Image (cartoon, helix red, strand yellow):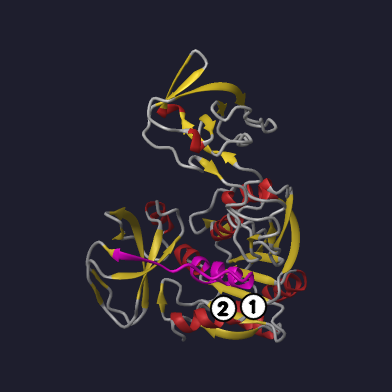
Amino acid sequence: MVTVQEAFRIVQSVTGKPGVEEVDIVTSTGRVLAESIYADRDFPPFNRVAMDGIAVQADKFKTRGQVFPIEDIQAAGSPPLILKDQNNCIEVMTGSVLPKNTNAVIRYEDLEIKDGKAKILVEKIERGMNIHPQSQDAKQGEVLLMAGKKISAAEVALLASIGKKSVYVFAFPRTAVVSSGDELVEIDEVPELHQIRKSNSYTLQAAMKEMGWKSESFHLTDDKELVKKNLRTILEIDDVLILSGGVSKGKFDFIPEALEELGIKKLFHQVSQRPGKPFWFGASADKTKIVFALPGNPVSTFLCFHKYIKPWIMNCFGVSSKHITARLAADVIFAPPLTYFLQVRTELKDGMLLAHPKGGGGSGDFANLKDVDGFLELPLEKSAFNAGEAYPLISFRSIV
């Protein structure tokens, strides 16, 4: 048995070189850039008006109440106008080019406009006020996004602004999600009293889809020879296998033995944690085939994916895991010498992230997951955990 820290280190050490694929920017969110992105021109590309109002020459302003006759209107999207008389002004709209021969913008809120003239209601005007200068954000040719950046809607806006309709991202490996057990039936079937519907494979695929990670789905029955035969076929096709069930000490848990017979070397089996203790992890000698064999209990499967598998694939892409901590909102006692992943509901209160413990029915109680949004990682060195103490949080929902 290995500790959680040892298991995490071993998993993270087995990384390969990911492929690259081109995707449309609209579908790129959640993916990781495989190319650096450069500014195709200055940002902004011109002196940009930041407020609706009037543009003037600042040094022509003398005193509050001064009046500037309006020469013209500068609309957004129109070529720049030229202020002909520097004692006059040009009305300007937000986002428009700053008219030539002007160097300050006064907001409508600070004006009184009547009969084609603008009366100034403020005491002071400064050069550059309410103007977004050309190239202030980035110069042409400057790196805007580095390879390895995870794409969100904010990055999509930037990609669109430089004319990138598609972008190169790291490709996920060919992956199989494999459920096992004779007690499982398809979700559209009516189970017998001794059966249950499949849920883990759907849970895993849904969690992967949130990242843009696609997979094939398979099922193994509790027959040793069939387990080995089917795993051999899957390993010939897919590079990453994520299995659920069949890895404990039961008489029908054939998966660890079958994997080793197929050339997948065990790197660890059993982790000193709850839930998810029976977790098995291995790889082929050349590290081209990676296998995560997770316990079949739904909460164990869910926890292991978010604790180990999601950070592993991000590490393959060069993205470091974010470390979030939360403070216990109540005392917790956990006596076994295991790392305890406590189900919690988080709350942001007075600038502090609080974790409210949520009791449940153990690793098989997946219904409890609907009421929580993360796991608080409580170390095995302690058994008493006090309210106010901070511990690592594995979040699977948006915190706020």
Question: Could you say which quadrant of the image residue 340 lies in?
Answer: bottom left
Q: CA distance from mark 2 to mark 1?
A: 7 Å
Residue nearer the viewer, 389 or 274: 389
Image x and y of residue 112, in percent = 42, 21
Image x and y of residue 171, in percent = 71, 63
Residue under the point 56% across and 29% down: 92
Image x and y of residue 141, in percent = 71, 59
- Is 302 situated above or below 265? above
Residue nearer the viewer, 43 or 171: 43
Q: Secondary structure at mark 2?
A: helix
Q: Secondary structure at mark 1?
A: loop
Residue type at numbered disc 1: Thr
- Is 255 situated above or below 121? below
Q: Does 160 sit left or right of 268 as displayed?
A: right
Which residue is under mark 2? Answer: 12
Residue under the point 22% across and 70% down: 386
Examine the rendering and report whether any part of residue 342 can be seen: yes
Question: Mark 2–mark 1 contact, CB under 8 Å?
Answer: yes
Q: Does 278 sit left or right of 77 as displayed?
A: left
Q: Does 228 sit left or right of 346 as displayed?
A: right
Which residue is under mark 1? Answer: 15
- Is 187 situated above or below 76? below
Q: Is residue 345 magenta?
A: no
Residue under the point 58% across and 69% down: 319
Residue under the point 64% across and 56% down: 212
Image x and y of residue 304, in percent = 50, 69
Tally of numbered discs: 2
Residue type at numbered disc 2: Gln
Q: Over which residues does the magenta segment extend?
A: 305-327
Within 10 Å of disc 2 (Cα), the crowding (few <14, some 14-19, many 20+) is some
Examine the rendering and report whether any part of residue 361 can be seen: no
